[in-house]
């Protein structure tokens, strides 16, 4: 990170990973049951790239099991 610069230096991804990040940044929720690898990607976005991604209990209604959804907390990114 650069001195005096508060935003993280981000890496551009390719393929489905970049599409998932763009979907998060657009305000959509990512359901963890839609794609098994979303959990891994969100962990990488949060820990390595320092994106403010939050987790909540998903209420999509497509699955009977309790699972999680992820969303991009844009307000934390603009402080």
Image (tube, rainbow, N blue to C red):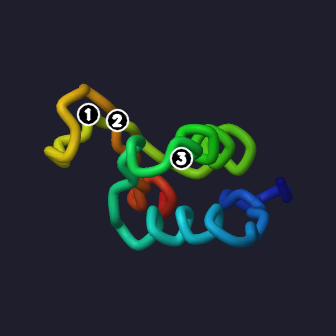
Tag shown at residue 38: 3
Q: In the rendered structure, which disc, 3 or 2, sits on the residue that comes first in sequence? A: 3
Question: Gap in Å between the C-alphas at discs 2 and 1?
Answer: 5 Å
Give the answer, above or below, for where 65 lies relative to 9. Answer: above
Look at 58% across and 51% down and name the residue there.
Answer: 51
Q: Nearer the viewer, residue 17 or 36?
A: 36
**Residue found at the very far right of the displayed protein:** 2
Question: Gap in Å between the C-alphas at discs 1 and 3?
Answer: 15 Å
- Residue of label 1: 57
Q: Nearer the viewer, residue 28 or 61?
A: 61
Q: Position of residue 39 (x, y in %)?
A: 54, 39
- Residue of label 2: 68
Look at 25% across and 26% down and name the residue there.
Answer: 66
Please, what secondary structure does the residue beneath circle 2 have? strand
Mark 1, other Cα within 10 Å: few <14 / some 14–19 / many ≥20: few
Q: In the rendered structure, which disc, 2 or 1, sits on the residue that comes first in sequence? A: 1
Give the answer, above or below, for where 61 lies relative to 26. Answer: above
Q: In the rendered structure, which disc, 1 or 3, sits on the residue that comes first in sequence? A: 3
Front: mark 1 or 3: 3
């Amino acid at each position: 990170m650069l001195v005096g610069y508060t935003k993280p230096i981000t890496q551009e991804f390719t393929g489905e990973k970049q599409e998932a990040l763009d979907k998060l940044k657009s305000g959509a929720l990512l359901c963890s049951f839609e794609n098994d690898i979303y959990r891994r990607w969100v962990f990488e976005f949060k820990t390595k790239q320092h994106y403010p991604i939050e987790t909540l209990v998903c209420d999509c209604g497509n699955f009977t099991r309790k699972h999680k959804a992820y969303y991009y907390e844009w307000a934390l990114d603009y402080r």
